[in-house]
Amino acid sequence: MGRNTRKRRTPLATKIVAGAAALAVGGGGLVWANFYASAHEDHGGHNRTRSAGAQVATIDCPDVGQKIRDVPDRARGEVDGELATMDSQITNAYQRLATTRRAQAGDSQFVQNSILGPLKDRRKAIIDRIQLEINRAGGKADDNLDELAGCQGRPADQQNGGGQDDGQNDDGQNGDGQNGGGQDGDGQNQDDNGNGVAGPVADDFIDINDVQPNSRNSRNGLAANGDGGSTGTFSTDCGVNENNLFNSDNLIAAPGVDNGAHHTHDYVGNQDNDAFSSDEDLANADTSCQNQGDRSTYYWPVLRLQDGTQEFDANDQGGGAEGNIGKILKPAQAELKFVGSQQGDVVAMPKFLRIITGDAKSFTNGDANANTSWSCSGFEDRQVTDKYPLCPEGSQVLRTTNFQSCWDGQNIDSANHRDHMAFVQQDGSCPEGFQAVPQLQVRLAYDIPTPTVDNGQVQNPYAVDSFPEQLHKPITDHNDFINVMDEDLMNEVVDCINRGEDCQ
């Protein structure tokens, strides 16, 4: 599969750690390094058998970016660059965690002394710089950010997707051979599926028939439209990335930073989208959308089938060098639709409005910003947030996302890339101070051979690309959007929705 070969400009944040390239361990990927190989070995003449549950599976760091508020505009580029450096630090620390299992087995303090301690010091230095940059630009930095410097090691037996169960505890997952994904200390633990990469594991999957109808319990992602208010829809057809536009950048969260996402994105719509694209670049770019007035960018992390395929990025940052391996799966269909509000008319989105929905770090952050919905065609009343569905033959895997649709009326972005937007409340209204804009709904359908789960192990799993330390958990799925519709088209979208018509 080809990739975007657009020549990159010099990164604005040149301080970003390039060390992620060094993650190519062994045969060209960030390997799991036989996670439990040292759990039951003899060292120095006596048996050092340890509980598998005590082994540290991944690194859990507080998300500094989500805690930052009121960054002056002239400091945002520097702050975003510093935050991207912190992401690279976590990636490098996870690489060290994944490749020092023997040393960890022989020294109970190895992780703390050699990985977490130094990581805290490096994060503290960056937090100090962030505070300095905010204050220097005329803002007032939060003096308590230092409290976020320390990270923890998360044991294998705490890998529960941040505690979210979607109302499915004991609904076909516990007591059927999948309790803990075969992670009960019996030697199967935290399986690497034979490909050397951590995740997903058997417990990350569920038969769609075992999901209770209408049981999804998510505080986010409510559909904005309903029987009242503005009931129209506007659909835009932008294809399924036929042009093979892929990169591991994130223009919203890490502008000016090469490989700011640490995982590969699919792009439809705007064809000039990378970390170094200006608003002017976006406005003048080609688009894959049939309506040429829609130059918006729509992007999401790719799904991969872990079948041994060597993709174009098998040895690259964002790809195999950071644990994202296997065949990239393009959606068979990508439906992009804008809908209205239950409570009244919608207003136009401002041009270049940026929206991130979901959380790429939900596994370690918890589910406060999670906004994932996985299902199967023919079973769409059964939705899960923290499991990949096992679909019956002939049924497609579905990823659906309902974006935030309440805008603060002033800003096209915010310091943490979230505060300028909000989800509708339970009654469909916007929070005080926000106004309703058209809600973007994305529905992606995939033709994926169903993985097999046997004796606590999963064969040929599919998984969403993720930051390495997030272990390809389904709850980390997310979606991104930048509005680059021309004024006439945006007005057409608003008028159509407010008149109650279905347009495209």
Image (cartoon, helix red, strand yellow):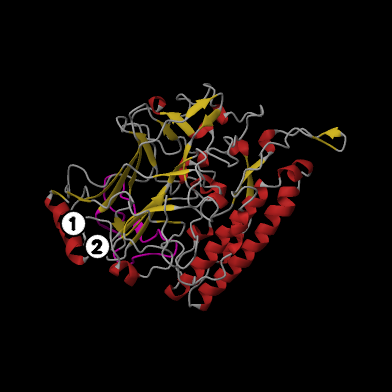
Q: Is residue 479 visible?
A: no
The crowding category of the residue bearing disc 1, from other C-alpha atoms within 10 Å (few below 14, some 14 to 19, many at least 20), is: many
The residue tagged with tag 1: helix, strand or loop? Answer: helix
Q: Position of residue 340 (x, y in %)?
A: 21, 50
User: Image quarter for residue 58?
Assistant: top right
User: Image quarter for residue 488?
Assistant: bottom left
Q: Earlier in the sequence, mark 1 or mark 2?
A: 2
Q: Amino acid at mark 2?
A: Met
Which portion, as a residue range, is magenta? 409-438
Does residue 418 show up magenta in the picture? yes
Q: Position of residue 115 (x, y in %)?
A: 69, 53
Q: Are marks 1 and 2 in contact (CB under 8 Å)?
A: yes
Please state the total of marks drawn on the protein image. Answer: 2
Q: Is residue 140 left or right of residue 418?
A: right
Q: Position of residue 80 (x, y in %)?
A: 49, 66
Q: Which mark is residue 60?
A: none
Q: Is residue 409 left or right of residue 171?
A: left
Q: CA distance from mark 1 to mark 2?
A: 10 Å
Q: Is residue 11 above or below residue 117?
A: below
Majority secondary structure of the magenta segment?
A: loop
Does residue 428 show up magenta in the picture? yes
Q: Position of residue 50 (x, y in %)?
A: 74, 34
Residue at the spot of label 1: 493
Q: Nearer the viewer, residue 343 or 9?
A: 9
The residue tagged with tag 2: helix, strand or loop? Answer: loop
* Residue at the limit of the structure toward the right, as seen here: 45
Q: Is residue 31 visible?
A: yes
User: Image quarter for residue 128?
Assistant: bottom right
Q: Amino acid at mark 1?
A: Val
Q: Nearer the viewer, residue 78 or 419?
A: 78
Residue at the spot of label 2: 485
